Amino acid sequence: MEAERPFHLVSPLLESLPLSRAAGTKVYMKLENVQPTGSFKIRGIGHFCQEVSVAGGGPWGCARRAGVQWGHPMLPSVSGPRWGHAAVPFLPLPPAFQAARKGCRHFVCSSGGNAGMAAAYAARKLGLPATVVVPSSTGPGTVRRLQELGATVEVCGKVWDEANRRALELADTPGWVSVHPFDHPLVWQGHASLVRELKDSLEAKPDAIVLAVGGGGLLAGVVAGLQQVGWPDVPIIAAETWGAHSFHAALEAGRLVTLPDITSVAKCLGAQTVSARALECAQESRVISQVVEDAEAVRAVERFLDDERMLVQPACGAALALLYSGRLQRLQREGRLGTPLGSVVLVVCGGSSITAAQLRGLKSQLGLE
Ligand SMILES: COC[C@H](NCc1c(COP(=O)(O)O)cnc(C)c1O)C(=O)O
């Protein structure tokens, strides 16, 4: 039924000549930065919210049970503009729908920003309220955009883990449902759609997929997707920045490790402890962990802006830096990646909390001119 139409877009897959030149192989960009909230997060978070809402009896669940078709004038609008406009007013739902919502009355999400944006967007589409708890490292621009989407925003703690503890407290409220930013099977299922789109778009399976890791949700989703499409052997190169390298630390230790703090400027990679699922993925699939300096990630953001005219967050810069810095060629020389590589897919994870002024500020903070 159309009511289960996902909230994410089928994102473009474009070859990048500058990245191909830098990486010494054909590089395709999976442009998740053009998703409605600016990052891949809407895939998994949107899927989670729709599933929970339907299960919990939200408008879609009620509609589905009542046989109401998509586009029913009483259903909330789902064609609303990208954030930045006043929230589209919702038509009052018939009493039957109101009553059906009892199972899921309110979403609450902890986030470095982008998962929160996705949760706020999904909640708005589902006609449900949302509260997003962010750490103090989340800029005022992100808070404002969350509020423009209709979310209530709480700022709690210095790092995501502290904000998450507050979100879990709020989730104890009857009817409130916690939306984890990276550690839930429904989130991974939603992210797996990215790989199904690669399968539809590419003539042959890629020789590697490059992505960024924060809590490991994107990694878990890509691994799930590779298994679903029959590409389980495609190596994944997992990028982090030093100071947000909880996945790398876990791989080195062979167990989950909690970083004492998040000191990287890539705050949206800032999970002090990576999810257990991410560590399992590294045991099930060919996952190669690579860590870059903040300076490399920020330089990569600027170079990508010049090369492809797209501005992304330092989290995405970490993955870009692997291509710009010759890391792929080094992995090939070390025999950890095949030679030659036919093609590589870079997940341009995006991120909405970045402006030209913030990029200049990051360069200044890191002494980059
Ligand atoms: C603390 O923050 C976790 C999460 N950001 C995660 C994130 C990642 C990493 O994704 P993950 O590995 O957490 O699924 C990559 N690229 C971008 C642009 C991201 O925002 C959030 O927004 O709450």
Image (cartoon, rainbow, N blue to C red):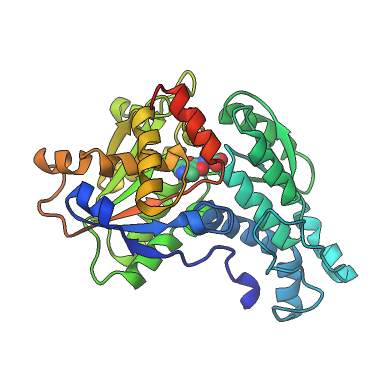
Which quarter of the figure is the C terminus placed in? Answer: top left
* Res 80 → quadrant: bottom right
State the residue lying farthest toward the right.
95
Which quarter of the figure is the N terminus placed in? Answer: bottom right
355 vs 177, nearest the viewer: 355
In the displayed structure, 268 sits above or below 27; it is above
54 to the left or right of 210: right
Residue located at (20% from left, 51% from top): 21
Percent x, y of residue 221: 43, 53
368 vs 337, nearest the viewer: 368
149 to the left or right of 328: right
Visible in this render: residue 36?
yes
49 to the left or right of 237: right
Percent x, y of residue 206: 24, 60
Residue located at (31% from left, 39% from top): 321
Percent x, y of residue 342: 17, 60
Residue located at (68% from left, 69% from top): 79
State the residue lying farthest toward the front.
369
Visible in this render: residue 270?
no
Residue located at (47% from left, 29% from top): 362
In the displayed structure, 68 sits above or below 133; it is below
* Res 59 → quadrant: bottom right
Percent x, y of residue 287: 28, 44
Number of marks present in the image shown? 0
